[in-house]
Image (spheres, rainbow, N blue to C red):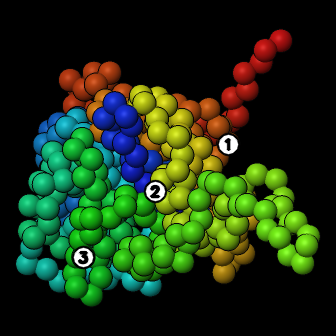
C-alpha cells in the first residue's frame, strides 16, 4: 500500500476490469480469500456485519476477520484500496456506522451491488481513526470502485470527510489527491505514440534516435505522479483488447511499467518497497487474476467455482516460488 497503482479498462466486448499493483516494504501474509454470503466480517474492532453478497479478493490471512486490499463481488462490483499519506483524514468519533479504513473494501463488497449502491451507503458511514490487528498504525488510504456499467468512483477521505470523484479517467496511484493528478496530466498532453519528424538546423538534418520519440518527456521515476502519468498514457494508447483474457494480458503489461523490483525504492528506514503482487478483477465473470513478486505466472480464482455451502472462508495463499515452464 506504500506505492500502489491502479486503473480500469473496458474491453471491446464490454468486460470491465479493475487492475492494480500492491507495493509494500514487507510481505504481509496474504492470499485470495473467498467470502460466502451470510459470513460475519468485522467492520471495526468491536462490531460485525453479515455479508449480503459473496465476494473474493486479496486479503490478509493472519486474522479471523481478514482485511481486504481489493476484490470483486458476485454482482460485479470491484474495489481496491491504495495508500494516501499526508492527506487521508478519519473521524475520531462518529454517530454513524464506524468503519475501520482497512475494512472499507470488504464492507462495501459485502453490502453493495454496484456504484449506485456504494453512493447510497456512504452518507450512513464514517471512516474512523482506529488501529487494526494487521498494522500498528492507522494506514492512510483512499479507494477506487467500478462495476459492470463501466462507471468508476474514487473515494478520498479528507478534511471534507469523503470527497467523491465520479468523472475520473479511472486511474489512481497515491498522494496527492486525485484532482491534483488529473491537473498534472496537462504537463504531458504532448506525449503520444507517433514518431517525431526530422528537423533541419543550419543545413543539417537531425533525426530522432530509434522508435518512441513521441514519448520523450514521459516521467520514468517511481513517485505517485510519475506512475499516474505512465499508467494514464498506456491505458489510453495501448491496443484495445477484445476479450477478458486479452484485457487481463494488456492490464498486466501496463502495470509492468510501474512494477517495483526490490532494492530500487528504499523508504526512510532503509527498507525496500516492492510490488508484492499484481492483480486484475473482472466485473463480468468475477474472475480474480493475480501474480506475486516471486511467481510471475498469472493465477485465477473464480467466485462461482467455489462450493460455499459450509459457510466458511476459502483461502488461496500467494505462490512464493517461481513457476518455470520447462520445454525440454
State if disc 1 and disc 2 touch (CB < 8 Å).
no
Crowding at mark 3 (Cα within 10 Å: few <14, some 14-19, many 20+): some
C-alpha separation, residue under disc 3 versus residue under disc 2: 18 Å
Crowding at mark 2 (Cα within 10 Å: few <14, some 14-19, many 20+): many
Q: Residue at x 17, y 83 (%)?
A: 93
Give the label on residue 294, or none.
Answer: 1
Nearer to the camera, 252 or 311: 252
- Of discs 1 and 3, which sits in the foreground? 3
To which residue does mark 2 refer? 6
Q: Position of residue 76 (x, y in %)?
A: 24, 39
Q: Residue at x 36, y 28 (%)?
A: 302
Q: Position of residue 97 (x, y in %)?
A: 12, 68
C-alpha separation, residue under disc 2 versus residue under disc 1: 20 Å
To which residue does mark 3 refer? 163
Q: Is residue 83 above or below residue 294?
A: below
Q: Position of residue 6 (x, y in %)?
A: 46, 56
Mark 3 or mark 2: name the one nearer the start of the chain: 2
Q: Is residue 196 above or below residue 10?
A: below
Give the label on residue 130, or none.
Answer: none
* Label 1 secondary element: loop
Nearer to the camera, 304 or 186: 186
Q: Is residue 104 visible?
A: no
Residue 267 located left or right of residue 174: right
Residue 1 located left or right of residue 93: right
State if disc 2 and disc 3 touch (CB < 8 Å).
no
Amino acid at each position: 500500500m506504500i506505492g500502489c497503482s491502479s486503473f480500469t479498462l473496458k474491453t471491446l466486448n464490454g468486460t470491465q476490469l479493475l487492475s492494480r499493483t500492491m507495493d509494500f516494504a514487507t510481505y504481509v501474509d496474504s492470499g485470495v480469500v473467498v467470502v460466502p454470503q451470510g459470513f460475519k466480517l468485522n467492520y471495526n474492532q468491536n462490531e460485525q456485519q453479515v455479508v449480503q453478497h459473496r465476494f473474493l479478493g486479496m486479503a490478509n490471512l493472519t486474522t479471523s476477520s481478514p482485511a481486504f486490499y481489493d476484490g470483486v463481488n458476485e454482482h460485479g462490483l470491484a474495489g481496491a484500496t491504495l495508500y494516501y499519506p499526508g492527506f487521508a483524514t478519519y473521524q475520531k468519533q462518529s454517530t454513524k456506522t464506524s468503519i475501520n479504513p482497512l475494512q472499507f473494501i470488504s464492507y462495501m463488497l459485502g453490502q453493495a451491488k454496484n456504484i449506485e449502491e456504494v453512493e447510497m451507503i456512504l452518507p450512513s458511514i464514517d471512516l474512523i481513526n482506529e488501529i487494526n490487528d494487521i498494522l500498528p498504525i492507522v494506514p492512510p488510504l483512499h479507494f477506487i470502485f467500478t462495476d459492470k456499467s463501466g462507471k468508476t468512483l474514487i473515494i478520498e477521505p479528507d478534511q471534507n470527510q469523503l470527497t467523491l470523484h465520479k468523472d475520473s479517467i479511472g486511474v489512481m496511484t497515491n498522494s496527492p489527491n486525485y484532482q491534483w493528478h488529473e491537473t498534472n496530466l496537462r504537463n504531458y498532453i504532448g506525449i503520444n505514440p507517433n514518431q517525431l519528424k526530422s528537423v533541419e538546423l543550419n543545413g543539417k538534418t537531425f533525426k530522432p534516435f530509434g522508435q518512441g520519440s513521441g514519448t520523450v518527456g514521459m516521467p520514468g521515476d517511481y513517485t505517485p505522479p510519475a506512475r499516474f502519468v505512465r499508467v494514464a498514457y498506456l491505458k489510453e494508447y495501448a491496443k484495445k483488447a477484445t476479450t477478458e483474457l486479452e484485457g487481463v494480458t494488456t492490464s498486466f503489461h501496463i502495470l509492468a511499467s510501474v512494477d517495483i523490483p526490490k532494492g530500487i525504492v528504499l523508504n526512510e528506514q532503509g527498507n525496500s518497497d516492492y510490488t508484492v503482487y499484481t492483480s486484475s478483477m473482472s466485473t463480468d465473470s468475477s474472475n480474480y487474476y493475480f501474480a506475486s513478486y516471486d511467481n510471475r505466472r498469472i493465477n485465477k480464482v473464480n467466485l462461482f467455482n467455489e462450493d460455499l455451502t459450509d459457510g466458511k472462508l476459502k483461502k488461496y495463499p500467494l505462490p512464493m516460488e517461481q513457476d518455470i515452464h520447462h520445454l525440454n
